[in-house]
Structure formats: C-alpha cells, structure tokens
Amino acid sequence: MTKVTKIVAISGSLRKASYNTAAIKAAMTFAPENCEIELLEISKIPLYDQELADSGTPEAVLTLAKKIHAADAIIFATPEYNYSISGVLKNTIDWLSRQQPQPFEGKPAAIITASMSFLGGARAHYHLRQIMIYLDVHFINKPEVMIASAHEKFDNNGQLTDNMTGEFLQQLVSALVTWSDKINS
Ligand code: FNR
C-alpha cells in the first residue's frame, strides 16, 4: 500500500483575502497523489494567558494539537508584520508549545511567506526558523518560498496567476514530502 503523507498547513493571517492563505490553497493543488494537505483553523484560539491555560486548555488548541500530532509534516505561511511573523501565528505557537507532548517536536516543516513588499516577508521567514528552534521543528532549507509583490501574483478571487510562484510552491510540497519520508522513517 502506498504511504500517504499527511501535511497540515497553518496560515498566519485571519484575513479572508489573505495572500498567505491563498498560497497554501495554491500549494494544495500541487500536492502529489500520495499527499494530503489540510488547512488548519486558528481563528478561535484565544490570546495566551497563563491563568486561562492553568484553568484548562481551550478546545481550539486541543483540536489543533491533535491534528499536528497526527500529521507527518507542517506548512507555515505567514505575513511579515513589523519584521516578524504575525501575532496570531506567534500566539498559536505559544499555546501549542505548552502542550504535552509538545506537538511540533521532531516535525518536518516548510515555510512560505507572502508580502506586498519586494522582500516577500524574508525577515518573517527567518524569524520563524529562529522561533521554532527550541520546539525542535526540522525545516527544509530549499526552496525558500518568499512571495514578493503578492498583490500582483494572485487575482481578486485568491487564485494564483504567477507561473513561477506555482513552480516554487510545487517544489516546496515535493521537497517537504521527501524530507518527511526521511525524518519519519
Ligand atoms: C504589514 N505588512 C508588512 N509587510 C512587510 O513586508 N514587512 C513588514 O514589516 C510589514 N509590517 C506590517 C505590519 C502590519 C501590522 C500589517 C497589517 C501589515 C504588510 C503585509 O505583509 C501585507 O499586508 C500582507 O498582505 C499581509 O498578509 P496577508 O493577510 O495577505 O496574508
């Protein structure tokens, strides 16, 4: 039986018209036959408060942790906000990092950043790598998918219109499946 690689994807933007969420949806269309990509929901995650955490982990966090545990690999797509990742993504990571067992531990992962600037969210890209070091996430190194001038690469319906970005996303999914097979074997 062919092994199916289960990838979960987290978008660091809650915007309906988010370019980062659109990039994940485009990546989903490039998933090979033996790979499933599920976009996870993070909009119901409350702001981290240790007292709230001490009184019981919110359902939205538990659900997310379960899905990440069950996944073979993770795709993060995040906007760059003030030279870092978005607050909602950091908040989500902070909640998940306090779960036991820690759901990110040892997981293969890949990063996409999309921004309207010429740098494509490069600073957030590298900042996410730094944030995930202690959580023991193993990122692929290449391709580095930083979607610059994102407003020119997607149409008003969030459909990818740029072939080169499509090629990079396809390479990213393929590299992540290969990396996941190596790490999880
Ligand atoms: C931004 N944006 C931005 N862009 C960038 O390239 N570098 C940055 O430091 C910032 N900082 C920043 C801060 C805040 C608070 C906002 C709201 C926006 C622009 C941002 O990348 C752009 O709006 C993206 O389109 C947001 O991603 P989504 O929502 O389209 O996925």
Image (cartoon, grey):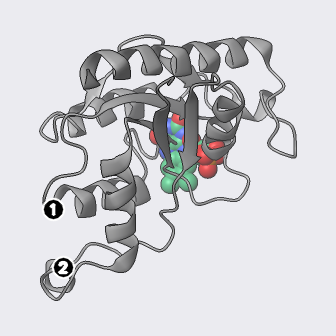
Mark 1 or mark 2, which has the lower sequence index?
2
| Depth check, front residue: 169 or 145 | 169
Residue projecting furthest to the bottom: 55
Say what amino acid the circle numbered 1 marks: Arg
Q: Which mark is residue 98?
A: 1
Name the side, left or right, on which 32 lies relative to 84: right
Inspect this view and state whether residue 140 appears. no
Tell me if I can see residue 27 in this picture. Answer: yes
Give whichever of 28, 36 is nearer the camera.
Answer: 36
Q: Which percent across, then down, holds residue 136?
A: 16, 35
Q: Quadrant of residue 124?
A: top left
Task: Sort mark 2 into few (<14), some (14-19) or many (20+) by Cα contacts within 10 Å.
Answer: few
- Give residue 144's position: percent from left, percent from top: 47, 16
Report whether the residue tagged 2 is closer than 8 Å to ligand 1: no
Q: Quadrant of ligand 1?
A: top right
- The C terminus - image quarter: top left
Task: Specify few, some or many for label 1: CA neighbours under 10 Å numbering under 14, 14-19, or 20 or more.
Answer: few
User: Mark 2 sits on what residue?
Assistant: 53
Residue at 56% x, 47% y is: 38
Position of residue 86 relative to residue 172, above or below, is: below
Q: CA distance from mark 1 to mark 2?
A: 9 Å
Q: Secondary structure at mark 1?
A: loop
Verify CB contact (< 8 Å) between mark 1 and mark 2. yes
Q: What residue is drawn where x is 38% and y is 61%?
A: 64
**Amino acid under label 2?**
Ala
- For the residue labelled by badge 2, is the local secondary structure a helix, a strand or a loop? helix
Q: Nearer the viewer, residue 177 or 166?
A: 177
Relative placement, left or right, of 7 versus 161 is: left
At x 63% / y 21%, what residue is drawn? 32
* Residue 143 locus on image (x, y percent): 48, 12
